[in-house]
Image: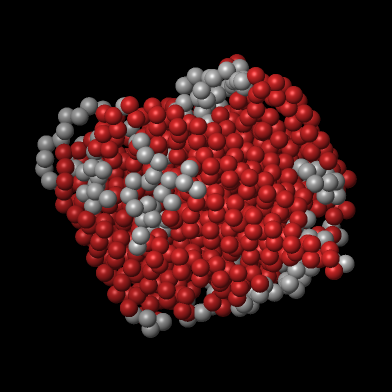
Amino acid sequence: MSYVYLYALLGVSLFVLGLNALIVHAHLLRKILAVNVMSTGVFLVLVALSSRNEEVLPDPVPHAMVITGIVVSVSATALALILMLKVNRATGKNELPDRGRD
Amino acid sequence: MELILGDVPWIVVLIILPLTGGMACFLFPAISKSLGLLTSLAVVACVWGLGWQLEEEGAQRYAIGGWGAPLGIDLYADGLSLLMLVVAALVGLGISVYSCGYFSPDKANHFWPLWLFLCGALNALFLSSDIFNLYVTLELLGLTAVALVALADGAEALTSAMRYLLISLLGSLFYLLGVAFLYHSFGSLDIAILAQRAEPSPAVWAAVGLISTGLLLKTALFPMHFWLPAAHACAPTPVSALLSALVVKASFYILLRMWLEIFPMVGTSFAQLLGLLGAAAVLWGGIQALRQTRLKLLIAYSTVSQLGYLFLAFPLGTSLAWKGALYMLLSHAMAKAAMFMAAGNILVLGGHDRIAELSSITQRLPLTLTAFTLAGISIMGLPPSGGFIAKWLLLQASIESGQWWWGIILILGGLLAAAYVFKVIGHVFTQDEPTRQAGTLPTTMEWSALVLALVAVLLGLFTSWPLAIMEIGSPFGTGHSG
Amino acid sequence: MERSRWLLPLLLMLCLGLGYTVLSMPEPVEGLPEMLVDNMEVAGVSNPVTAVLLNFRGYDTLLEMGVLLVALLGVWSLGGIPDYRESSPGLVLDIMSRQLVPVLILVAGYLLWVGADAPGGAFQAGSLLGAAGVLLLLCGWRIGNRCSGLPLRFLLILGLGMFVVAGTGLLLIGGEFLQYPSPVARELILMIEAAATLSIGATLAAMFLGSLPGGADK
Amino acid sequence: MEALTILNWVLDGLLGVSLFSLAWLALASPDIFKAIVLFISFGLLMALAWVRLNAPDVALAEAAIGAGLTGALLLAAFARLEDISIGASDGEEVQSHIQHDSNEEPK
């Protein structure tokens, strides 16, 4: 039971924590934060499981996938933030109008 | 002729061409309209070239960077992806022709680069055989679709774009976690290699659940469809057409590809669940469509209902059922795009799309009305149309496999579709005097709707060609039967 | 409220299920790392992550540059965001950015160059350039109107454009798409990485600004 | 050798607990600005976690993009959010007009 599984479990718990926050919170900026925490959780699972046996070097393919994922999530966050500002200007509120269940 | 067609790697050109076109439109906004139209035409030609190549040599695998499957990324083209490419190219051409007349100059500068990048993302998605590469194409598709929905300024469009973006990101993250599980248990990202190595284990069950949930979120299957009607109804018309006809189908394609290759051992219990959800979608979508008072919302709910048919093929599982579902996908894409364009024409000329007061506007739009009615015939599944052939194949498959209750769903769905299409037509063919509203509609907008609707109907007559395309590389042959 | 009554147990079950799956994950019988190691000397760069990012899975990175560009297109098509308030930058920010921006650019250049053999590479260097751009924007600097048209747009598509041009060029001289001939692979990768770094930096800075520079609402 | 592994486990445990609590506080804190600052510190600590999982490239990317640029984007959006809401609060009639528009379509 090497330390790697500790981080993998941490990744899963961050994923679920973010999912809970995404559903519960209504403020759009909080939802964007929740999506970022979820993606960090998924990346943690990806990288943690890549160095399971210590003697060989960690597998670089998940590292490349996570770097690509980080750049994808920053561009999605940028678009989401600007869209949130436009929604705020158009509706005066920071939440999605109806029950907004996700 | 053979030399030129033979060795040109159409599979790569199909991805690079729209991306280059998008960059060119971004660089030179002044000529973006002609560049966009030219690229759409060129994409149709490339799809024809690829089809010719696949006809000759069967399914084609292309190793990018020359590294081969486990290390590098492979592109794979067989009958299933070719059919999806044909749908994307033809509907894409119709949408490009329609958008030439639809957008104001400054909106057009933003529309064309995004639209061509969306075309590139669709082609890359239909051709890729690497599950992480599918994640990147899904993300590219989601971001372009959200940006296009947000082109329509107005509180309703922006809130639905925001909700669509959050759902799209949520779906992509579920999908990515599933990819992580698959990679770490079988050591490869390529679908063909995963198909050989996959055997049931907790990781595979979790991956099946996660990937299916993520993709069902993006395909807006019944319980997770709440984001679709608002997004498709408030978006600019060509955007709602491309969302309903193409973007929603892309995640269905990935689920189908995964289901046929990596998850055949999943068994019937999960397939029955998908079938039930599909049946619920058919009924719920139809009922909701009946209750709408705005035309575009009615068509959007009709999309929710028609998507349900595609999922009826999962519990049946025979290759006949898959062909029926794909035929439904093909004819629905054509018919739904035509319907949305017709609704757009009415909205542009009349300023509103409340169904009760449509008749005064539609007196001046005969071509648009014929397009709407022909598309309605295909949506209902009346004999001469593609929709009828698709429902016929699905009906046949359900009777052959003994699960007759899916047949009942097909018939009920057809009745509901007839109800909401005739509801619109009932309001439209009255002899009110036409409005004296100023302004006329560019004819290209009416003709592109009519041509797409005609194709949807002609699909009912010329069925051999699409069915032959689906056979290349026998994507369903390896699928589990029953 | 009623929603959290069924939500929390569901999420806890999901967490336990995923946790159990992660712990019971079987070791892949033939993993990718072994195959990767004996292909490394042909890859042209010795840093395995850069080799995977740029050479083995270069197509992913190409689409990645497309995602960045599309996000910026989306941000610009939304437009209409009030430009950052033109408050004059405080003394501290002004002096700090005068010191920091040149250093950031230097470090970005180093990261780009060292990426071939040690941790670093296009994305890290590009984000540092983006950070330098953000600092400049905070100080009230704006790109001159003269070059906020075509030159800026060309810089923004440089990354994706260089990837596509290099890929099709290699295709035309007889290889597969994006197949680097191994003697010249290192130089090709560095060229593509340099273009990618520039356009990532420009894209991230433009996304921070939020609206079209020198555009309608200027 | 024994002491080293215990020390490793203690440090990993500490890092894991602090990461989870930072994320929890960032998502649950009442004030938005505090949530953003906590999220940025969570990003920086994540960079440390990537180093511990011997992924230096990812650590660089996370520190530069995940904590740095995402944090800058969040703070910029938060600042503009304040401007808009201050601006909109005095335009009361604008508010009601928007309200009227968005809910006349049946849900």
Q: Is residue B162 visible?
A: yes
The correct choice, above or below, for B391 with respect to B144 in the image is below
Seen as rendered, the residue at the extreme front is D3
Q: Nearer the viewer, residue C215 or B261?
A: C215
Question: In the picture provided, is B244 more to the left or to the right than B259?
Answer: left
Residue C97 is situated, as x and y percent measured from the top left of the image, at: 69, 24
Name the side, left or right, on which C190 lies relative to B480: right
The answer to which quarter of the image holds residue B460 is bottom left
Residue at 75 percent across and 68 percent down: it is A2
Its colouring scheme is: secondary structure
x then y, percent, for residue B146: 46, 44
Is residue D84 or residue B466 the one in the foreground? Answer: D84
Q: In this orientation, does residue C53 appear?
A: no
Q: Is B207 placed above or below C102 here? A: below
Give the residue displayed 63% in from the left and 29% down from the top: C134
Task: Report the residue at 29% width, 44% height from top.
Answer: B343
Q: Is residue C45 left or right of residue C19?
A: right
Quadrant hosting residue A46: bottom right
x, y percentage for residue B384? 31, 61
Image quarter (top left, top right, bottom left or bottom right) of the N terminus of chain C:
bottom left
Q: Is residue C139 above or below residue C126?
A: above
Measured from the top left, where is residue D59 in percent x and y? 73, 48
Q: How many marks?
A: 0
Name the one closer to the observer, C62 or D33. Answer: D33
Q: Residue at x 55, y 36 (%)?
A: D75
